[in-house]
Image (cartoon, coloured by chain):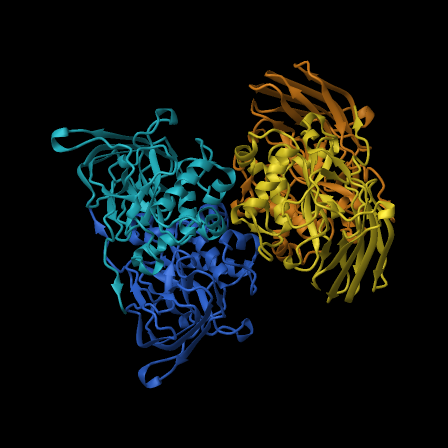
Chain colours: A yellow, B orange, C blue, D cyan
Amino acid sequence: VNRLELWVDLNYDITEPGVDFVFNIHAAQTPYQTLSNERLILNQDVPTQLNTDPCSGNRYLRLRALAGALHIAYAVTVDLMHHHADPVLLGEVPVHQLPIEVLVYLYPSRYCQSDRLMNLAMHEFGHLQPGYSRVQAIRDWVFGHITFKWNSSNSTTSALDTLVERVGVCRDFAHLMIGLCRALNIPARFATGADFGSDPALGPPNFQAYVEVYVGGRWYIFDPSGTVIPMGLVRLGTGRDAADVAFATIFGRVRSRAPLVRSVALADATHDIVPPWLCTQALSTDSGPLMPAITGH
Amino acid sequence: VNRLELWVDLNYDITEPGVDFVFNIHAAQTPYQTLSNERLILNQDVPTQLNTDPCSGNRYLRLRALAGALHIAYAVTVDLMHHHADPVLLGEVPVHQLPIEVLVYLYPSRYCQSDRLMNLAMHEFGHLQPGYSRVQAIRDWVFGHITFKWNSSNSTTSALDTLVERVGVCRDFAHLMIGLCRALNIPARFATGADFGSDPALGPPNFQAYVEVYVGGRWYIFDPSGTVIPMGLVRLGTGRDAADVAFATIFGRVRSRAPLVRSVALADATHDIVPPWLCTQALSTDSGPLMPAITGH
Amino acid sequence: VNRLELWVDLNYDITEPGVDFVFNIHAAQTPYQTLSNERLILNQDVPTQLNTDPCSGNRYLRLRALAGALHIAYAVTVDLMHHHADPVLLGEVPVHQLPIEVLVYLYPSRYCQSDRLMNLAMHEFGHLQPGYSRVQAIRDWVFGHITFKWNSSNSTTSALDTLVERVGVCRDFAHLMIGLCRALNIPARFATGADFGSDPALGPPNFQAYVEVYVGGRWYIFDPSGTVIPMGLVRLGTGRDAADVAFATIFGRVRSRAPLVRSVALADATHDIVPPWLCTQALSTDSGPLMPAITGH
Amino acid sequence: VNRLELWVDLNYDITEPGVDFVFNIHAAQTPYQTLSNERLILNQDVPTQLNTDPCSGNRYLRLRALAGALHIAYAVTVDLMHHHADPVLLGEVPVHQLPIEVLVYLYPSRYCQSDRLMNLAMHEFGHLQPGYSRVQAIRDWVFGHITFKWNSSNSTTSALDTLVERVGVCRDFAHLMIGLCRALNIPARFATGADFGSDPALGPPNFQAYVEVYVGGRWYIFDPSGTVIPMGLVRLGTGRDAADVAFATIFGRVRSRAPLVRSVALADATHDIVPPWLCTQALSTDSGPLMPAITGH
């Protein structure tokens, strides 16, 4: 078991009244990621709604802010009991056997235009043995061909741009890896968390974009940017790409300060709580399908 | 009440064994669109799965085809009891009051890059009174600025391409209208059906792409291509854009013949069954949310 | 006659030795734009080459800089004797009658993808009377549909991006206008100068991108961004688009400070020297073809 | 010496009167490519103009066609006396030493967006020894990463599209190679000729797009598509990319039939005339600069 303390601190200056916010900063709850001591502090006295999307399981906080400063502080203790698997045993699942709600992660999305990457994906990875190791090869290819550089991309940058310009941040690495997986009919989705174990030279801790790929009947974690210890990733949200799980989607004009994010591992040998480590096994925190497909008509 | 008979006929020549198909040709079932006498005939003796996606309500048929000819015939009788509304009463719903599962229809998608259309949408429609009439203005703008032309677009054509090249088919009109709505924070989604009432000069009946926009607490139907009688549209699927609801997604190489689609209105005055007509009221066949959001934490 | 004093001041910090620079900061020389008292001061003692491109007439200064500070100061006195014409008399020239060296300005270029703008151009301007007034209508359309905003574009922004995002700086206005002209088979090119008469609220004086269009047998000046007094534009270079006439193309990594540009009108009534004014006549400073086409084979 | 007979046959059905055509089907004349027995037959009795562009040396035929059939037949005997060079001796030329008229071939163009390819070019080729061998490595990379496939691209397909989709025809191979060379500050241009020695399985003879790169003080020939014998290429035109040297640019709507192109090698041992062969030396037919740069001011 890993135990992490997560803190998120967001600050905005709002110059017009009535700006709507949708936040996705709450940690997800799954059988493999359990939460305790969750706190949310808001400096404005406005109504908030916290909803769990029934399709994605993401937890969205919404509010309409007043003019002035908006400060949000969130903290939670997260216990991670990863599902571990031997990569050799994880095969790709044929399309006709995928759970119905996994199908959408085969389709191209705003930032992952897999429909245009099929030749490239077949040329580079088509000859490889299907399964986890092929997904790992895609991850390694993205890691090897793209250079990490702060401020090298923006909110319109897509997997195609990253493929051409060969530079990006973790979000861009994730989009390209997702696009390549989908181009080979392997379901892949975008996940957000807090980075853990990242090199301080890469800047202060921040939100982290990574990838989950569906092999062997589960969603497994990959970090194509190679900047974190995957076992330490606390999952906030998953979606088709960054459009779905922005930590803040803002409907109006505001001034934002950089978010403060901190993720600290606790250890307690007597309770088998150990810090995350770099392991070679496949890791998953996914609960599996949230609801059964309705079969028949 | 409108009653329509829908027939779909698909033909493929499959040259390699084991090609997976995902079809979205089954009519949706909602309280406002009820089905009877549904038939599916398949020339190959292979297992099939018919699943209803719990998030979208779309009904997906999957199978793995053998080499040789694949022929699929689907037919159904559909009763449409539209929800009618006075457009004047349908306002836009603030983001913080939207049902949680509607949020994703605010975000950009593969073919509807609303994130890049905000200035244009504000410039053209920002000064208009919010509500159904503004959505209608967007629909009219798309109809007025884009020229319908067969074979003028392909599977990679997006709303941005259509905006630049000013030409497209119904799918392209739909993508551009959706992109513009989302750019104004109005939820919009892509819907597929069978065209009804289209000009025979535009070619034989075919699948039809149209738009549903969330105003006044429901999804209302719009046809930006101006080629059909909206009341006669039988809904097959809805999604973020065409990527989600292709009538056939094919995982392998096959030769396809053009689909045959026919949609015929029945009339029976003694049972109040009348043919669809061009009406000025807002129309919806949506069931509303399929499942309640889980509120609180 | 207008007389302007032009000063340009460029500053770089060069961290690696041997960076090549190509500058296009020298004023062009034509029968309608004559130069006197031209000075160039360079803080580094390196060889320079000043060449006039025989095809464009642009004057390019090249040098290989040493590590350290690079400071370049250029100044010149420019006399402008515009060719004035009555817009009503300026017709479009049929393609088969264009001078051979004008043909390339019909073709799409990096930032002016006119091949994709034909439907839009025909839809908006195809019904208008050909000639200067139609070009003016294109200029007014661009001015009316695009919003001027600093830092809203970058070096990869093209006319298609500007058309979609509806925002840009003078360079973007120019690219879009050029693309629309070429889409109608009207030769158009990109010109650079120093802004004159611009609103100080738009920032300090800077280089200015504008447009020259070939009608009535000459290249006439247009300012689609509406920020300057066209008569006061001193021409530095012309090309297919911004790629050809960057004021500095740098082959290596350097730190740049914002260029200082100043353009001041002199007046001397006794010599008929008057300040530029906003006039409704068509203006040209072009010399006409630099060299005769070689006809026959 | 190589001697080739070149025939070109073009056929159009013109439905509206007064369509302008610009053809670039005449072989170029250089000291290394001399012409004899040149013939042009036209079925319409309309005036034609044949001009040599003073900047590119391309020979453009222009005419305004009448309604009806337009048939153009061109034939010429071409003697090629290539400049041969040892690749080892051909270095890259520093930007500040390039002839002034070569500079434009460093800049991005419509189909060769080199400004976006710099990281990729540096990553793949930045560590290689500058010179002909590095250009050959770029050519081999393009040949190895792109698959030749008829009808896989269209008139809007650019180097970026080809890089993403990994498929194209000779024109697309050329655009990508040019883009990569320019991204490394190596001047590169697009050339058109008639294919020679191509595999008949690739279809009937046709126009061929290839690449010329400026190294060692001359323009050398490269065929990134690997479909022809480079020594047998008769040069028609050169330009920044395909936009400049379309074999036919048509200003109006016409029906076109596929062009007929034939290029046959003659041999006459007594006069040292031999068929082209695949050779490992660097080949050039370029005359060098057509006119001296005007130096100084």
Query: Which residue corresponds to the image point at 36% horizontal and 30% vertical from the top-left?
Result: D258
Query: Is residue B297 found left or right of C157 in the rendered image?
Result: right
Which quarter of the rendering shows the C terminus of chain C?
top left
Residue D110 position, x and y percent, is 43, 49
- Depth check, front residue: A160 or D64: A160
Residue A170 position, x and y percent, is 64, 50
Query: Which residue corresponds to the image point at 87% horizontal and 46% vertical from the top-left?
Result: A271
Query: Is residue D173 found left or right of D278 in the rendered image?
Result: right
Query: Is residue C78 found left or right of A192 in the rendered image?
Result: left
Which quarter of the rendering shows the N terminus of chain C?
bottom left
Residue D69 position, x and y percent, is 32, 32
Farthest-out residue, bottom: C270
Quarter occupied by residue D102? bottom left
Image position of C57 with respect to C185: above or below: below
Query: Which residue corresponds to the image point at 53% horizontal and 75% vertical from the top-left?
Result: C200
Quarter occupied by residue B278? top right
Residue D22 position, x and y percent, is 32, 43
Image position of D99 with respect to C115: above or below: below
Image position of B67 with respect to D6: above or below: above
Quarter occupied by residue A1? top right
Inspect this view and state whether residue D133 appears. Answer: yes
Inspect this view and state whether residue B230 appears. Answer: no
